[in-house]
Image: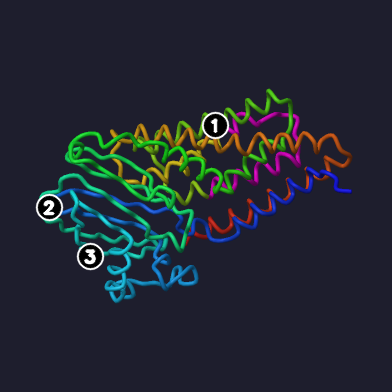
Amino acid sequence: MFRFAPSSIILALVLCLASATASPAHLGSLSYSQLRMEGSHILYRLRFAAHLIPGTGPAMEGKLVRTDIVRMEPRLLEWLANSVRIESGTTPCVPSIADTMGPDANDDLEVVLDFACRGPVDGMRLAFNAFDRQLPDYQNIVAVETGTRKFGFVLSQASPRLNIPAAHTDQAAGEPGPGFFTLGIGHILGGFDHLLFLLGLLLLGGTLSRLALVVTSFTLAHSITLALSALGLFRLPAEPVELAIALSIVWVGAERLVRTSHDRRLPLAFGFGLMHGFAFADLLGRSGLEQSEMLGPLLGFNLGVEAGQLLVIVPALVLLGLLRTRSRADMFERVLAWLLVAVGLAWATERAATLLA
């Protein structure tokens, strides 16, 4: 007869997260594009992982060099002309490659397309499906510059089109909508290091009100640095931030194993939460949006991150509560804590090597 085993479920989740994080981080499911209207031309700048070019693939990551990109420009143009389509009025605009940059050390490639339209740009329609085959879950953050303002949008396979009516070309092109909210949810659910840190906080135990206070401290901290960094008020380089996040996982695992008489969870959850917020902000910081236009996307993204946290915390608390009613629960929690320490140390070693390289 089947028996519900919360310990097995929790262990399977931790092992899945650990194995996922052992693979190269961020295989390019997120890309960025910027559009600027200039008379009868639309300049379109797309930044993405170079190995997503059809015919390359993840096995080529880190192997493409500048000469490869120059040689591939005709194929690049053919691919992008078929997967990024822009119309002004009712007439398609014709693209040509204006520039290419990269790939850089992170495998990021930037391609600038010059879309020539028949007359002055009068409204615009964009259809984007560049990564439908390679990455069905891709998201593309678009910064549209119309006159003196920029507006942020999120395109995906489920929502691949953007319309800017003629009457809005120098005004608000509509609010950012729910795209940044869903982007925040997806970012936290795909951020396995953030999820492991949250699980570690829950493993530290305590009353429900105490756990709520610890998680709130973490949430408040990462919301502060997310806002500061996304608005360009204070930023940290990505490499030391990623190293600090790996060490935060080591800390929560070790804290569960040691169980000192001093409860340091609140200050440390807040301190490490500041680091996690800088990591969240890196996504918005590369969007190309101006600080004055960042408030809407920032609010939507942060609310999405908090909603994603709840989707993880609530079932995890239920499973841990059920687990603690069973025998040998302490032994199993210690096994989970050791796993967190091991995974965190592996990441910290890898990220420290990258930082020192």
Q: Which residue is mark 2?
A: 40
Q: Which residue is mark 3?
A: 97
Kindly report the distance in space between the C-alpha atoms of the residues bearing marks 1 and 2.
46 Å
Residue 266: where, in percent of width, then height?
62, 29
Q: Nearer the viewer, mark 2 or mark 3?
A: 2
Q: Quadrant of residue 269?
A: top right
Identity of the residue drawn at 37% across and 57% down: 129
Which segment is the magenta one?
Answer: 243-270
Q: Nearer the viewer, mark 1 or mark 2?
A: 2
Considering only order in the chain, which callout, 2 or 1, is on the residue closer to the N terminus? 2
Of the pair 172 and 333, the residue shown nearer to us = 172
The answer to whether one can see residue 355 in this image is no
Of the pair 315 and 165, the residue shown nearer to us = 165
**Secondary structure, magenta segment, majority class:** helix
Q: Which residue is mark 1?
A: 219
- Residue kind at label 2, given as amino acid type: Ser
Instruction: Answer whether labels 1 and 2 touch (C-beta < 8 Å).
Output: no
- Asked whether 242 falls inside the magenta stretch, the response is no
Of the pair 324 and 65, the residue shown nearer to us = 324
- For label 2, count other residues whose C-alpha is less than 10 Å away and answer few (under 14), some (14-19) or many (20+): some
Kindly report the distance in space between the C-alpha atoms of the residues bearing marks 3 and 1.
43 Å
Identity of the residue drawn at 50% across and 36% down: 274
Residue 161: where, in percent of width, then height?
34, 49
Identity of the residue drawn at 19% across and 57% down: 93
Identity of the residue drawn at 46% across and 31% down: 224
Considering only order in the chain, which callout, 1 or 3, is on the residue closer to the N terminus? 3
Q: Is residue 33 left or right of residue 178?
A: left
- Residue kind at label 1, given as amino acid type: Thr
Residue 321: where, in percent of width, then height?
77, 33
At mark 3, the secondary structure is strand
- For label 1, count other residues whose C-alpha is less than 10 Å away and answer few (under 14), some (14-19) or many (20+): many
